[in-house]
């Protein structure tokens, strides 16, 4: 039975799985800073001045890695069929890339290997999606996309 595409507008969302919220991450870093500073101060009072230097270097490196983590914590990929057009929106580190594909010329490549992504192409436009999904979920979404899009004409 044909689908009523006028009413249904399917969409798929792939998001990065973040274990900690921003508030939890900042609290954990604050506790680490307090604990490390207390230990470094105790060694500094005993005359071991190189310990606070290494402690400070450690805290700076942890801060850099946490900033990188926070920068990518909100990355996502969103696919949607809207008004007969496949819209792919990818956000990475706050940068948004949006691609639109006409369904009658869009080619979907179903991933076969565990590391392959869903390839969507139409003419010169080429996008790979599914970086935040499991291989099974990528194959499932690719099959659903193929079912929603009209078959390519030779």
Image (cartoon, helix red, strand yellow):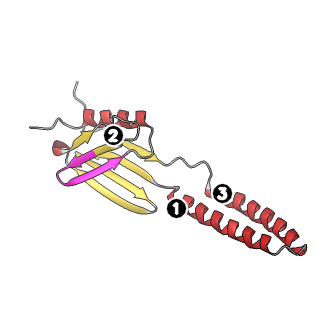
Magenta stretch?
120-129
Q: Image check: 74 left or right of 5?
A: right
The answer to which image quadrant residue 136 occupies is: top left
Residue 116, percent from left and from top: 36, 41
User: Element type at marker 3?
Assistant: helix
- Badge 2: how crowded within 10 Å, few (<14), some, or many (20+)? some
User: Element type at marker 1?
Assistant: helix
- Residue under label 2, please give it: 10
- Quadrant including the N terminus: top left
Q: Image check: 43 left or right of 7?
A: right
Residue 125 inside the magenta-drawn segment: yes
**Which mark is first along the chain, 3 or 2?**
2
Asked whether 63 or 113 is in front, the reply is 113
**Which mark is first along the chain, 2 or 1?**
2
Residue 33, percent from left and from top: 75, 65
Residue 54, percent from left and from top: 73, 69
Q: Image check: 46 left or right of 153?
A: right
Q: Residue furthest left?
A: 154
Q: Residue furthest right?
A: 46
State the residue at coordinates (35%, 36%). Answer: 141
Q: CA distance from mark 1 to mark 2?
A: 29 Å
State the residue at coordinates (56%, 58%). Answer: 69
- Badge 3: how crowded within 10 Å, few (<14), some, or many (20+)? some
Answer whether residue 83 is visible to the viewer in this image: no
Q: Which mark is residue 25?
A: 3
- Quadrant including the C terminus: top left
Q: CA distance from mark 2 to mark 3?
A: 34 Å
- Residue under label 1, please give it: 71
User: Element type at marker 2?
Assistant: loop
Asked whether 131 or 49 is in front, the reply is 49
């Amino acid at each position: 039975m044909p689908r009523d595409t006028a009413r249904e507008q399917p969409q798929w969302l792939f998001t990065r799985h973040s274990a900690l919220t921003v508030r939890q991450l900042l609290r954990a870093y604050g506790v680490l800073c307090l604990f490390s500073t207390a230990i470094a101060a105790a060694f500094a009072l005993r005359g071991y001045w190189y310990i606070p230097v290494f402690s400070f270097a450690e805290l700076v490196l942890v801060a850099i890695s946490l900033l990188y983590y926070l920068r990518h914590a909100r990355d996502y990929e969103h696919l949607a069929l809207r008004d007969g057009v496949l819209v792919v929106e990818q956000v990475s580190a706050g940068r948004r890339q949006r691609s639109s594909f006409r369904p009658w010329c869009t080619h979907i490549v179903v991933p076969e290997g565990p590391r392959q992504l869903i390839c969507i192409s139409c003419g010169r436009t080429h996008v790979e999606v599914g970086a935040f999904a499991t291989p099974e979920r990528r194959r499932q979404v690719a099959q659903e996309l193929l079912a929603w899009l009209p078959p390519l004409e030779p």
